[in-house]
Image (cartoon, rainbow, N blue to C red):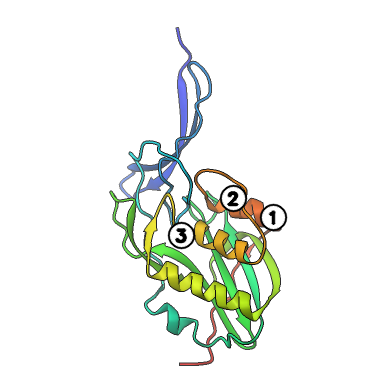
Amino acid sequence: MNAPVICTYIGWWYDDGTFEPIMLLGCSGGDGDISPNYGDGVGGHGGGGGGGGNNGDNSGLTMPPPPKIPIADMQKFLSCFNIQQSANLTIYAAQMGSSSLAGHAFITITQGNNTMTFGFYPKNGYAQQLIGPGIFGDDSGHPYTNAWDAGSITPTQLQQIIATALAYSNSNYNLGFSNCSDFVLSVLNLIGLTNNTAGVNTPDDVATLIGHFANGTASSTHRTCN
């Protein structure tokens, strides 16, 4: 008689007691351990997933919910920054299963009295789709498990980060190839910190890369211009 196979998922519990699986974390028993099948990404608040060559089964995956505070005009949101001056950058990760099932990755840029905290989300939470319009959200006060003060960034790096954010804001959110983790990893790459993981990128990858385990809540956005 074969041993039972026990699988672990992350997903959504609803008020009626039903459970909707989002991602298979792995199975054990039977003929041995079964590696996780991430499909093209993972769901959850703030969205895990990421860019990688994974062609697994997409069944059971759902688009994460949209941001609580959507940023309708990203260019205007970032317009208070003087791109000819340096700024400070902080990287955050909320590991999967912490503040939300799939976690989140996001950043804060501070320059003088201006502070902007934001991350990349799907604009709409279509349950049966893995790709849809993307939008940034104001992540003021978002819980995190890891935070890294990257220190001062040059005017050129600030310009590059803003350009990257604007490019993401005009693109689709893709659970497998373009989500919150991918945006943050792109920012990290611009300041010289390279992600060496292959396959699907998640907030856990960001957390591993930046280290600095420290539970807390992110800085609140404060803009001094209209």
Give the image location of residue 141, x and y in percent: 54, 71
Whether residue 139 appears in this view of the structure is no
Give the residue drawn at x 48%, y 71%: 165
Task: State the mark number for residue 46.
Answer: 3
- Secondary structure of the residue carrying tag 1 is loop
Q: Which residue is mark 1?
A: 211
Q: Are marks 2 and 1 in contact (CB under 8 Å)?
A: no
Q: Which residue is mark 2?
A: 205
Picture quadrant where residue 145 is located: bottom right
Type of the residue with mark 2: Asp
Which of pointers 2 and 3 lies earlier in the amino acid sequence?
A: 3
Q: Residues within 10 Å of mark 2 (few under 14, many from 20)?
A: many
Q: CA distance from mark 2 to mark 3?
A: 14 Å
Type of the residue with mark 1: Gly
Give the image location of residue 7, x and y in percent: 46, 30
Of residues 82 and 119, which is closer to you in this image?
A: 82
Task: State the mark number for residue 125.
Answer: none
Q: Are marks 2 and 3 in contact (CB under 8 Å)?
A: no
Type of the residue with mark 3: Gly
Give the residue drawn at x 43%, y 47%: 41
Q: Is residue 10 shown left or right of residue 72?
A: right
Above or below 179: residue 89: below
